[in-house]
Amino acid sequence: MPQQQPKTVAQNKKALHEYFVLESYEAGIELFGTEVKSVREGRVNLKDAWCSIVEGEIFVNGMHISPYDHGNIFNRDPLRVKKLLMHKKEIMRLLGTTKQQGLTLIPLSVYFKKGKAKVQVGLCKGKKLYDKRDAAAQKEAERHMEREFKERMH
């Protein structure tokens, strides 16, 4: 049986613009039935989401999952704090790293892997304004080179 690729539902493009991603981790996410259905429809917003570690457990805050259309009374608060599922050792290592080096945990994407909802959590360092300018200039240069290459090929 061929290896199944994870189906990406949502990405946090703002995080890639605002932060350098040093490492990324995969975590399960604790969701209720109607939330899973909503996530499958792609109704997730990670724009202002961040992760926090409280009493040895990791949570994602500010992740908006729109209420499921046919969920009626079973729908949950779209902005409720959701628990992430990771090994205790990993969580403790992340806690130590974030406390010592002043790094942040940001959810980068939500996807399905083998039928389970997963979140890619990035260990991130904030970009300064000049870093953002450098990244934009580099992106523009790559676009320009790509354009030139295409023109020469025709």
Image: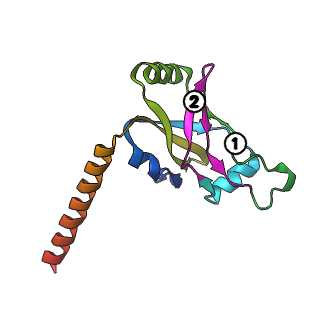
Magenta stretch: give its range: 45-67
Mark 1 neighbour class, 10 Å CA radius: few under 14, some 14 to 19, many 20 or more: some
Could you tell me the amino acid type at mark 1? Leu
Residue 84 is inside the magenta segment: no
What residue sits right under mark 1 in the picture? 31
Q: Secondary structure at mark 1?
A: loop
Along the line of sight, the residue nearer the viewer: 43 or 29: 43
Q: What residue is at 66 percent from the left and 51 percent from the top?
A: 65
Along the line of sight, the residue nearer the viewer: 103 or 8: 103
| Residue 40 image-quadrant placement | bottom right
Visible residue check, residue 78 = yes
- The circle on residue 52 is 2
Could you tell me the amino acid type at mark 2? Ser
Percent position of residue 21, x then y: 38, 39
Q: What residue is at 42 percent from the left and 18 percent from the top?
A: 100
Residue 46 is inside the magenta segment: yes
Mark 1 and mark 2 lie on one chain; the one further toward the N terminus is 1
